[in-house]
Image (spheres, helix red, strand yellow):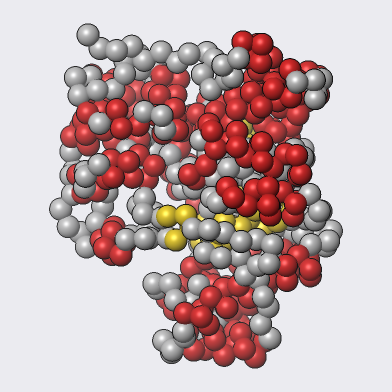
Amino acid sequence: MATPLVLHPDRALPADPATRDVARRLYAATRSLPLVCMHGHVEAQVLADDTPFPDPARLLVVPDHYVTRMLVSQGIRLEDLGVPRRDGGAVETDPRAIWRRLCANWHLFRGTPSRYWLEHELSEVFGVRTQPSADTADDIYDQLAIKLSDPDFRPRALLRRFNIELISTTDPATSDLRHHTRLREDGLGEQVIPTFRPDAVVHVTHEGWAERIEELGGLTGVDTSDYPGFLDALRRQREAFVLAGALATDHGHLGTDTTPLDDAEAARIYAAAFEGKVTQDEAEAFAGHMLFVMAGMSCEDGLVMQLHPGVRRDHHDGIHRAFGPDKGFDIPVAAEFTRGLRPLLNEFGHHPNFRLVLFTVDETVYSRELAPLAGAYPSVRLGAPWWFLDSPDGMRRFRELATETAGFYNTSGFVDDTRAFASIPARHDLARRIDAGYLARLVTEHRLTEDEAVETAVDLAYHLPRIAYRRPRNP
């Protein structure tokens, strides 16, 4: 007999009965609030085209590196999960076979946030009432396929159903923003906005860097063959993003060095990169310099700067060559913020037009570095637990380690980080439950009144993300 899929109403709430009772009331105050999704990776084209999702596997398995990562760790090949190869090599094309592999290995996800998100998606979004398993895989697949053929399950319909008030995409600096233009024409320009991601043009040793620089020049009509032209093109493209509704930039760096270079040295490294003669040390120095430069540009145009350091991208060379980036082989490394960010914060940390949202996957810096920085500099906010840490216990640890020094109001509230569109409400639901539990403990310990806890829970879920990204009122 199939095991029922039943979501307990108290899931992720505290086990202690007295604390749980308070947490239930706090969660009730936030559960129906609109979603503010200021840090996502849903493609703008998905919402612009509004075509039906193709099948259950390509919606819930193939694009979700949280899911594929776990399966690969147990010996299942990415090819067998339908992940396309760069070289056009053979991969599994039968979505039902891919779905069966997930369901047959459902036990691997016990205790993981992926299990929480997937169960929420299956039950709350698609109405599935049985646990995935080898025996139930085909039946669940058929249920999902029927739902995905229904117009009520197309991307824009789900945008409304999920109660997403504001969602940002993450777009490369070389994006022509044509999909956002279509969204604006369809009346969604205030709801779906771009985010400027310049990584591919500031990391000069990245694959295809010269080609991206040429694209940037073509988009902006600027000669980017020299460093001054490069900076001019960046300013023009940022302006295009602002006109398209962007509120933020997004920067993925291995480290946090923000030491500025003098113009002559920056120009020399830029020129050396075109000649293929740049060293790794020079490339890293240029990337750190560009963080400093981007902070200055944010003071000019008001875009909130998001920084995501501390991840060694594409740890396995063979996987990267065969499948490209973002396939589950990005591994955290120790992060350092205090020294690295000092040049940037010395220059811009008190600038009235500057805002810096810091993320980390290194929990050791929460109380030692990040909370003290956010608790001192008016420009700094702490981003929500990200990637490996957007889990029940990871979120609890974040509140415990950061709140005493930074407080609640030097954080960004919850902003999800997902490519899996259908998991967005699940991620926000989990964050609201964890925050309700943390606040409930403060109430039962007589450190907050319940009225204060309700107000704080609502702020964390809704108001703080809008304030952190400088959109405090509804459009």
Is residue 455 depicted above or below 259 in this figure?
above
Is residue 26 among what the camera can see?
A: yes
Q: Is residue 282 left or right of residue 33?
A: left
Please name the residue shown 56% across and 26% down the image: 429
The quadrant in which the C terminus is found is top right
Which is more toward the observer, 329 or 414? 329
Is residue 215 depicted above or below 353 in this figure?
below
Location of residue 136 (image quadrant): top left
Location of residue 452 (image quadrant): top right
Please name the residue shown 28% across and 59% down the image: 319
Is residue 146 among what the camera can see?
A: no
Residue 105 is situated, as x and y percent measured from the top left of the image, at 25, 31
Location of residue 435 (image quadrant): top right
Q: Is residue 425 left or right of residue 49?
A: right
Which is more toward the observer, 15 or 180? 15
Is residue 209 depicted above or below 2 in this figure?
below
Q: Is residue 93 left or right of residue 281?
A: left
Please name the residue shown 53% across and 31% down the image: 392
Residue 361 is situated, as x and y percent measured from the top left of the image, at 53, 50
Tally of marks: 0
Q: Is residue 205 left or right of residue 223?
A: left
